[in-house]
Image (spheres, rainbow, N blue to C red):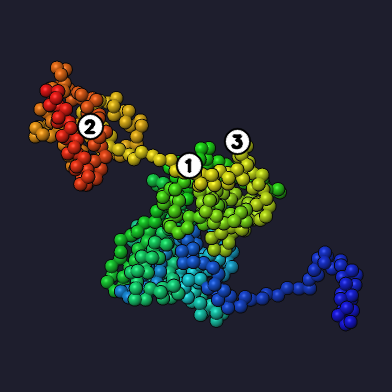
Amino acid sequence: MTNSVGSHAISQGNEMDSRVWIEDVPITGQKVIEPDARVVDAFQNIGYSLEAALADLIDNSIDAAAKHVLVRFVRTDNELHSLDVVDDGRGMNDTEIDRAMKFGGQRTYQTGDLGMYGMGLKAASLSQADNLTVISRANRSKAVGRRWQAKEARRGWQCDVVSGQFASEALDAALSGFELSHGTIVRWDQVRDFRKASGRVDAYIQRIRSSLTVHLGLQLHRFLAGDRPRLQILVNTLNVDTGQASPNFRVTPLDPFSYAHPGSRGYPKDFRVTIPQVGDLTCHAHIWPARTKEAGYKLGGGSVARRQGFYFYRNDRLLQAGGWNNYREDGEPHLSLARVAIDLPQRFQSFFSVRFNKAAVDAPRSFVDALEHAKSPDNKLFPEFVERAQVVYRSKPERKLDPVFAPGRGIRAAVAESVRSTRSVIPRHSIDVVWANLPRKTFFEIDRESDQLLLNKRFRNVLLAGRPASSADLPVIKTLLYLLTEELFHGERQSGIERQRLDAYQAALVAAAREEE
């Protein structure tokens, strides 16, 4: 009974005072509420992988106009000690480094910058390491440094000031390879994942270097691509016990749309998605060829089915590498060939929600609904693209002839052109057909080392039957022998069955030549 009365009273109050839910909340004053220093603990579980955290640091390097970035693992014989990210960007002065190290520090981003929230340096670093040191020097400025220790931050936001002499010496050593005086070092100490490397440093570095180069090569592939890339990323190790640095390993671009030929005619195809009250967005739809083994399709290995779907970019930086954002189920094998590149214009960056670690994008329901009506210039609907990708996946592969060594000297040009127009040829290899002195019971020999098909000169005149000799004489016989033996030039040695076959050919051709005589 009491509960019934209480519910009735609340209902009455809602009806009488409903205006309070739409009126402005009255304010009587303001006060500053300092953040609890234990917020540092939250960064340790913020969702960064080691690879994603390093990518976030390199975003800052790109925003600082760096052309080169070095990721260095500092080790002893048995332990991993620390990790450095060195760049040759603009660097920072005393005021700028304080702003960079401030939690929630305000920074004005330019239109093309990769930074978003002003927290990437601290959040990414403290998600992996207990200590973060930043040392930097701007052009015509002194070297400066700051260090966050997680334990000191918890005690009351006490940030260490690094010795100017140490900062200067560290930068001089780190930037010597860049031949520049300005740049930045981000150093991680007490990296929690490095505990796994104890006693097995080589194996750990090999594994993490592999996953790191795949991640960076994919997320930043547009910056790394081309004959004159905007950015070069190197990875190496420094053994402080021996003083030796390993050779630099260069991160290469891993383009998820780098097929030589599309999997279906008419693709890639652009679809225009109209979002009410926001505008139009272009989706670049791609269909990979079926059963391809290219690196751009496999993207480092694992299930390629999880790589289907949307690839969102912001200022050329990849934010999401696959997934359908609730448009349809992720990971369906029959859609493994379907990928869609979407560059987010400035006006859409508040419509789509970019995850804090820049590893995924959340799309509103209105985007998913609009995809059903998205059209290409040839009036195809987006769902038709999805259906076509499934058809290509299920189709049987076309059987293709293997590439061949092209006909070379001794075979008529018209014959060689015919072969090239109907078969793909292996670059820098051709088979020359030449006359040579061979034993009487031999019609031809195969010389793999010089890529030559040798014909017995003693049968030449009888086969010519009075016609004049030339470098390309007897085109029918030479062409038939080229076609008969071409595949035998590919292997390093002949198999037993191949030798038996050649012996049978020799006997038959020698018998035929003697009949001509």
Pointer 3 and pointer 2: residues touching (CB < 8 Å)?
no
How far, Cα to Cα, is label 1 from label 3? 18 Å
Who comes first in sequence, dot 2 or dot 1?
1
* SS of the residue under disc 1: loop
Q: Quadrant of residue 217?
A: bottom left
Instruction: Classify the position of the C terminus by image quarter.
Output: top left
For image coordinates 44% across by 53% down, the residue present is 298
How far, Cα to Cα, is label 3 from label 2? 50 Å
* SS of the residue under disc 3: loop
Q: How many marks?
A: 3
User: x, y (%) of residue 447?
Assistant: 17, 39
- Please give left or right for residue 500 compared with residue 225 in the image: left
- Please give left or right for residue 502 compared with residue 82 in the image: left
Residue 7, above or below 57: below
| Kind of residue at badge 3 | Asp
| Kind of residue at badge 1 | Pro
Who comes first in sequence, dot 3 or dot 2?
3
For image coordinates 19% across by 42% down, the residue present is 500
Instruction: Quickly name the residue at label 2.
Output: 481
The residue mark sitting in front, 3 or 2, is 2
Within 10 Å of disc 3 (Cα), the crowding (few <14, some 14-19, many 20+) is few
Who comes first in sequence, dot 1 or dot 3?
1
How far, Cα to Cα, is label 2 from label 1? 37 Å
Instruction: Quickly name the residue at label 1.
Output: 262
Q: Quadrant of residue 13?
A: bottom right
Instruction: Quickly name the residue at label 3.
Output: 378
